[in-house]
């Protein structure tokens, strides 16, 4: 299935984006930031330029975007681009990244399934394609162990998700419905109080007791554990093969059409980055943390990054069947109408890269571009 092997110490993630407007869960805001990193914002020395002088790549400063963090930090993507320069852009929410892609200021982006679906559906399939997977897992239900000891104890409690209709919100609403409980998806009121709370303030809300737990991505989940929380459920346990997409790689259809050689080079870089992460999990963890420190001013504590990192799996496989399932969950929760996802994937260049590397091809689950 996946071109990447399970991590020895790495598996990750965290999240993404709303499905009604399909906002992302990974972010701590909605603004984009262009980087001035001299090692990333330049072409490889002496390299030959491809068909584009530069490629603008977006990502989140989040462990679920480990491929981007490590690939940029280690120069593994830049190396494949030769003289074509990378212009990295850091985003804190899916909608702003989709807006940049649609507006022509971004060419390729690392992003969650919900904003990918939303961007594709809103443009009637004209603006983006998913061209690779990037990560799976890294989402947990963390609770106050003094108030909640079993899953049945969630009834009547206040549980946070990052945003209404985001990937984790949809997963939690689906889990609630499977328990036979009822929650209004708009207000979050019902048998469980679903409290939509930005990831950056969730730890404080948890410490203050205004929420009893949270269904959140990493590293927020591990921050809650460090503050006395207990992991009651790992979302990977709910999925076949314990895998589900948390981060994709998308591309502007215009850029894909005009610069397929550049897109292919980026994909060679992501495949090699994932391979390096899997072969060097400790070095990769340090690399990702160094990149996060450059973004936010300080690295994550070991008590946070160690468990967060170990819950993520980097993978070239987009795990397409799980993206469709997540869309179905949002429909079931009455957050969106049934979307037409035909053509959302174009994995031809990725599979070309995988074949050349002697790796197995991956599937688009029948949702590929013709």
Image (cartoon, rainbow, N blue to C red):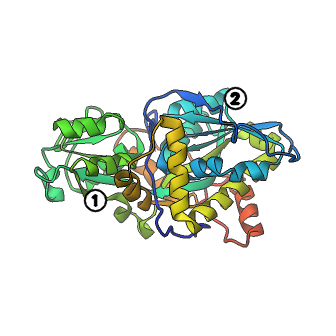
Residue located at (21% from left, 45% from top): 182
* Secondary structure under the numbered disc 2 in the rendered image: loop
Residue located at (57% from left, 65% from top): 280
Q: Position of residue 23 (x, y in %)?
A: 45, 35
Determine which of the numbered discs, if any, sits on residue 104 in the image: 2
Q: Position of residue 293 (x, y in %)?
A: 50, 41
Q: Return the disc, 1 or 2, that comes first in the chain's sequence.
A: 2
The answer to whether the residues at label 1 and label 2 have Cβ atoms under 8 Å apart is: no
Residue located at (13% from left, 58% from top): 149
In the foreground, 199 or 127: 199
Asked if residue 320 shows in the view, the reply is no
Image-quadrant location for residue 97: top right
* Secondary structure under the numbered disc 1 in the rendered image: strand
* Quadrant assignment for the N terminus: bottom right
In the foreground, 128 or 330: 128
Q: Is residue 132 above or below residue 111?
A: below
Q: Position of residue 5 (x, y in %)?
A: 56, 70
Q: Residue under circle 1?
A: 233
Q: Is residue 313 left or right of residue 84?
A: left
Q: Is residue 362 left or right of residue 300?
A: right
In the foreground, 83 or 215: 83
Cα distance between the residues tagged 1 and 2: 40 Å
| Total marks placed | 2
Q: Position of residue 281 (x, y in %)?
A: 52, 64
């Amino acid at each position: 299935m996946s071109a990447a092997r399970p991590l020895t110490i790495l598996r990750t993630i965290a999240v993404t984006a709303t499905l009604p407007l399909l906002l992302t869960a990974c972010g701590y805001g909605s603004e984009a930031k262009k980087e001035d990193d001299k090692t990333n914002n330049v072409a490889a020395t002496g390299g030959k330029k491809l068909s584009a002088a530069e490629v603008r790549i977006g990502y989140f400063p989040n462990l679920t975007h480990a491929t981007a963090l490590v690939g940029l930090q280690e120069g593994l993507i830049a190396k494949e681009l030769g003289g074509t320069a990378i212009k990295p852009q850091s985003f804190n929410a899916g909608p702003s990244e989709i807006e940049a892609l649609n507006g022509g200021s971004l060419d390729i982006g690392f992003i969650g399934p919900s904003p990918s679906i939303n961007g594709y559906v809103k443009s009637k399939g004209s603006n983006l394609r998913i061209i690779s997977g990037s990560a799976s897992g890294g989402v947990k239900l963390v609770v106050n162990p003094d108030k909640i000891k079993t899953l049945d104890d969630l009834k009547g409690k206040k549980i946070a998700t990052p945003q209404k209709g985001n990937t984790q919100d949809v997963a939690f609403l689906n889990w609630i419905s499977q328990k036979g409980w009822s929650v209004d998806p708009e207000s979050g009121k019902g048998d469980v109080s679903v409290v939509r709370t930005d990831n950056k303030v969730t730890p404080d809300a948890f410490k203050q007791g205004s929420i009893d737990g949270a269904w959140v991505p990493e590293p927020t989940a591990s921050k809650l554990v460090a503050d006395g929380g207990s992991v009651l459920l790992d979302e990977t346990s709910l999925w076949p093969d314990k895998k589900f997409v948390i981060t994709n790689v998308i591309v502007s259809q215009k850029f894909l059409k005009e610069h397929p050689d550049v897109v292919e080079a980026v994909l060679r870089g992501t495949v090699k980055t994932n391979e390096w992460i899997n072969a060097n999990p400790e070095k990769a963890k340090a690399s990702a943390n160094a990149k996060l420190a450059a973004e936010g001013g300080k690295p994550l504590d070991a008590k946070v990054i160690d468990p967060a990192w170990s819950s993520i799996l980097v993978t070239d496989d987009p795990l397409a069947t799980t993206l469709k399932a997540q869309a179905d969950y949002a429909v079931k929760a009455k957050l969106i109408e049934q979307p037409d996802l035909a053509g959302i994937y174009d994995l031809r260049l990725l599979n070309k890269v995988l074949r050349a590397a002697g790796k197995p091809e991956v599937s688009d689950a029948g949702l590929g571009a013709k």
